[in-house]
Image: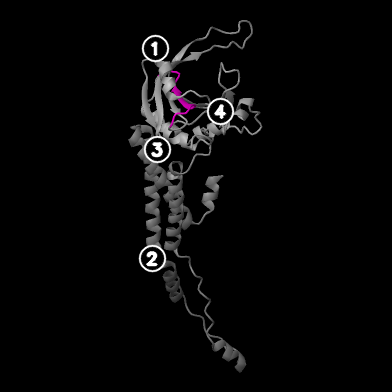
């Protein structure tokens, strides 16, 4: 179908079109062949370039023929043949009317010459148009975003407007919700802060929970964003425990990988602990295996304010493989995320 349409085009449009397409595809295929060191694409590219060269030769030959037309030999032969024939004797003709003689004596008006199309203009226009199309086909995948749906979209936080908050949130001044924590954590540069800029968030969620072992009296909202490599969790605990007291409890428990520091002018502490691994059997029968020790997690705990009057944020990072980013990644997340959390983060 496409070949039939191309054959219907005029010569000065069809040939420049085929030259432009052949040049673009030939050069592109040869470039890929050299880059991948494959002889099959090299042969295909050579065929395109050879065919293009032949068409260029045909166009050049046609242009030269239009610029230097040869004299028509048939007209000369007809004139010589007319001279060789005997001339008939003239016969007396009746005298025409003067009006007719005057009309016959006037030379016939020459027909208006038909204006021929500008061959060079057609060729240049066709080459320019199809060269632009070829460049768009060549560079389009690199300059334009892909619309085939192969690139995964970043996960977004679900709206928690209809979520019913526990009574502990009514007793807490200016508490943040899980939805607000999720929106603060799910940043476009979070993967870059973790050291994996090419990854996209697969899961983003937030819940407005209460702290365990408090009878539902302490608000503890949290949010979590998952990537292929790391998972980041941020929680806010609205209790009266200060960072200084928290450090004493960790040392009393025998934890050694503890480092105190200051983040955004507030007391903070870095610590490590293992996550919990729980297996759930959805096939019926046994309810699942026992709770096991999961991979190591690294947590940065930052006080709500510089005076350390109680309450803190936890920023925790872990991975299924057990690998952890540098502590600088946790510090970078805290410096970017905490100032955007409403309420006590100001």
| Label drawn at residue 50 | none
Residue 63 falls left or right of residue 172: left
Q: Secondary structure at mark 1?
A: loop
* Mark 4, residue position: 205
Q: Residue 135's spot in the image, x, y percent?
A: 43, 48
* Mark 1, residue position: 254
Task: Give me the C-alpha separation between circle 1 and circle 2.
Answer: 97 Å
Task: Give me the C-alpha separation between circle 1 and circle 3.
Answer: 70 Å
Q: From the viewer's perspective, is residue 317 above or below residue 61?
A: above
Task: Give me the C-alpha separation between circle 1 and circle 4.
Answer: 33 Å
Q: Residue 142's spot in the image, x, y percent?
A: 43, 41
Residue lying at the far bottom of the rendered structure: 98
Q: Secondary structure at mark 3?
A: helix
Query: Disc 1 vs disc 2: which is toward the camera?
Result: 1
* Mark 3, residue position: 44
Span of residues in magenta: 307-322
Task: Give me the C-alpha separation between circle 3 and circle 2.
Answer: 35 Å
């Amino acid at each position: 179908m496409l070949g039939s349409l191309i054959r219907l085009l005029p010569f000065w449009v069809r040939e420049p079109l085929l030259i432009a397409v052949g040049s673009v595809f030939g050069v592109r295929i040869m470039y890929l062949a050299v880059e991948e060191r494959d002889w099959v694409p090299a042969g295909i590219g050579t065929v395109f370039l050879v065919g293009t060269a032949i068409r260029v030769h045909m166009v050049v030959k046609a242009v030269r023929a239009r610029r230097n037309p040869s004299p028509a030999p048939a007209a000369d032969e007809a004139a010589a043949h007319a001279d060789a024939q005997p001339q008939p004797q003239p016969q007396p003709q009746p005298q025409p009317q003067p009006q007719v003689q005057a009309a016959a004596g006037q030379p016939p008006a020459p027909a208006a010459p038909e204006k021929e199309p500008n061959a060079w203009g057609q060729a240049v226009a066709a080459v320019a148009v199809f060269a632009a199309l070829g460049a768009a086909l060549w560079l389009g995948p690199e300059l334009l975003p892909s619309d085939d749906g192969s690139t995964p979209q970043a996960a977004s936080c679900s709206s928690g407007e209809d979520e019913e908050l526990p009574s502990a949130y009514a007793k807490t001044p200016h508490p943040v919700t899980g939805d607000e924590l999720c929106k603060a954590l799910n940043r476009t540069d979070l993967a870059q802060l973790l050291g994996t800029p090419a990854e996209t968030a697969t899961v983003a969620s937030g819940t407005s929970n209460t702290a365990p072992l408090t009878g539902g009296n302490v608000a503890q909202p949290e949010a979590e964003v998952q990537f292929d490599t790391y998972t980041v969790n941020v929680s806010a605990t609205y209790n009266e425990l200060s960072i200084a007291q928290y450090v004493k409890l960790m040392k009393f428990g025998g934890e050694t990988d503890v480092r105190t520091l200051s983040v955004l002018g507030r007391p903070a502490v870095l610590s490590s602990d293992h996550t919990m691994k729980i297996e759930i059997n959805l096939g019926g029968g046994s309810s699942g295996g026992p709770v096991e020790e999961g991979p190591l997690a690294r947590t940065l705990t930052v006080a709500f304010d510089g005076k350390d009057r109680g309450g803190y944020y936890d920023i925790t990072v872990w991975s299924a493989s057990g690998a952890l980013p540098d502590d600088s990644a946790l510090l970078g997340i805290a410096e970017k995320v905490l100032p955007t959390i409403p309420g006590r983060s100001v």
